[in-house]
Amino acid sequence: MKIFSVALLCVSALALAAPRVSGIDDSDAETNARISALDVAGAFSNEGFKIRDGHWAGPLKPKEKAQLMTVNLYAGNQYYFVLGTEQDAHIVLAVYDETGKKVSTDTWSDGNKFATSVAPAASGPHYISVRLADGEPATFCLLYTYK
């Protein structure tokens, strides 16, 4: 029975980290948050960045633990992680390497739009942390660009 509980926990964690395909079961709030994120990502695409297929979306509540998403990043590439919400919010967005060291730089925000850049020194798994610091609950959409 213990093995089943551990396996279920692992499957649940993987389901939370899997990017959602746009248009499938998105709420209006998630759609509006994605529009905000794509608005910022579009500016990066004008600079030669490609927008990665898929996105993460969901609710954020103030003072709850950060939501973590896992991605594989490659040394030599530059990335922008872009997050949008439906309304203005106080989001904390950061990227960490596999050892837990913060690697994001040049964090930017403007009301309901957020971005942080990453140029990883080593290839491998990285973790994106998204947290609502305070204020009203918000729905977020996170995507990323690369070149």
Image: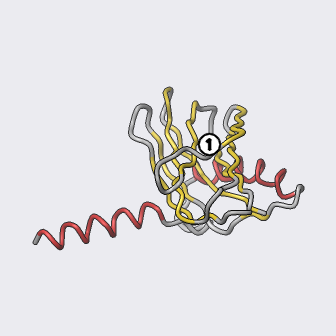
Q: Is residue 86 above or below residue 135?
A: below
Residue on which the image places disc 1: 85
The color scheme shown is secondary structure
- From the viewer's perspective, is 5 left or right of 35? left
Nearer to me, 24 or 53: 53
Residue density around tag 1, few if under 14, some if 14–19, many if 20 or more, within 10 Å: many
Q: Is residue 112 above or below residue 39?
A: above
Where in the figure is residue 3, as x and y percent of width and height?
A: 16, 72
Q: Is residue 76 above or below residue 92?
A: below
Q: Residue furthest top?
A: 135
- From the viewer's perspective, is 107 left or right of 133? right
Where in the figure is residue 144, as x and y percent of width and height?
A: 68, 57
Where in the figure is residue 115, as x and y percent of width and height?
A: 69, 44
Residue drawn at (62%, 42%) of the image: 85
Residue drawn at (78%, 49%) of the image: 39
Residue drawn at (87%, 61%) of the image: 48
Q: Residue furthest left?
A: 1
Specify the amino acid type for callout 1.
Answer: Thr
**SS for callout 1:** strand
Where in the figure is residue 97, as x and y percent of width and height?
A: 53, 53
Figure quadrant of the N terminus: bottom left
Q: How many marks?
A: 1
Nearer to me, 18 or 47: 47
Residue drawn at (51%, 46%) of the image: 101
Picture quadrant of residue 45: bottom right
Q: Is residue 109 above or below residue 98?
A: above
Picture quadrant of residue 8: bottom left
- From the viewer's perspective, is 146 left or right of 71? right
Figure quadrant of the C terminus: bottom right
